[in-house]
Amino acid sequence: FTETKKINMGSLNISRGLPATIVLLSLFLLRIHNSKAFNGSNLPPARTPRGKAQVQPYVGINGRSHAALGYYSSIIKVPTESLSFDKKHLDAARPLHLARKAIGDNRSHQAEKIYAAQLEKLKSAPLEAMDIPAFAATTLLMALHHQRHNKDTRKARAVFNYFFKVANDYYVADGRSAHSPQSTSHASAGHAHTHDDGSECFCMGSVDCGEKCTARVLQAFALFESKNSLMPKSRFLIRRAVEYDPSVASLLRWKIFQEGGAGASGLATA
């Protein structure tokens, strides 16, 4: 028998008079075609753009936290993968990354509030439990913020001075001389420790991460004071930086840090 009605379905237009078997077969093929189009089974596999490697996120951590840790590690100068993904490191990294984003969005005042809140939080910890790397990173960024965005030398110096005082008190409380922070056996042996996730911290070797970060802040402080023509203080600070981290002793050969040396413009080595 033959179909006596006109059938309209999508792009299929079947006129009267066609055998019913052809109608049913056409509908069946149309259904198969539509299902392939929607599930993408007939599409070629996606390609990675040439020259752009796919970045795999760290297991157990979202992309935003990974970016924050990456930024934090660039400040304290350690590989991102060396950081433990525990609450301590994430709490240190996230505010700094948030402040960076605020600066990028032209909200420098908001960034200053974030830095100030983070410093207050770090200051509230007992001296023996002070997170020196986080304190150093926040100090560097806050002092730089005051110089670049606020043009406020007084506030920048106050931030540096406070860190210098806390660092001295911290190493004295830890059993190390303020004038020779690496003089004890505790310092020379280094001290590895574990965090919440059971991973070992990177604080290994003759100079731990706190001392290296302390030295980095004192280097920045020394350059800051040299730009303000306070050369005796600048030379004193750079000598203290070398006491915390002897690997930066080559800085003592910079003309700027030698007696009779030039101001901040004389950065060439002797």
Image (cartoon, rainbow, N blue to C red):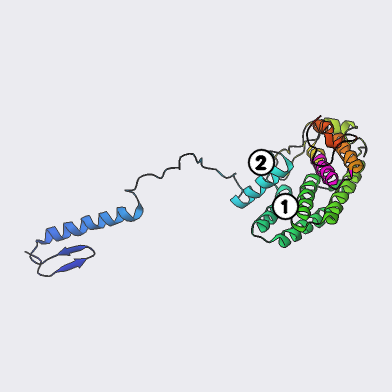
Whichever of labels 1 and 2 marks the residue nearer the N terminus, that label is 2
Q: Nearer the viewer, residue 217 or 153?
A: 153
Q: State the image quarter where residue 261 is shown.
A: top right
**Residue 269 shows in the view:** yes
The residue under label 1 is 91
Q: Is residue 30 left or right of residue 88?
A: left
Determine the secondary structure under disc 1. Answer: helix
Q: CA distance from mark 1 to mark 2?
A: 15 Å
- Residue at x-position 70% and y-position 56%: 99
**Residue 125 shows in the view:** no
- Residue at x-position 66% and y-position 41%: 80
The three-letter code of the residue at mark 1 reads Asp
Q: Quadrant of the C terminus?
A: top right
Question: Start and end of the magenta stretch?
Answer: 213-230
Name above or below for residue 249 compared with residue 144.
above
Where does residue 11 sit, x and y in percent of width and height? 22, 62
Where does residue 218 sit, x and y in percent of width and height? 84, 42
- Residue at x-position 67% and y-position 58%: 102
The residue under label 2 is 80
* Count of marks, rendered view: 2
Where does residue 212 sit, x and y in percent of width and height? 80, 38
Residue found at the far bottom of this picture: 5
The three-letter code of the residue at mark 2 reads Thr
Q: Nearer the viewer, residue 16 or 171?
A: 171
Name above or below for residue 13 compared with residue 45.
below
- Residue at x-position 89% and y-position 45%: 230
Q: Is residue 226 magenta?
A: yes
Q: Characterize the magenta stretch by its predominant secondary structure.
A: helix
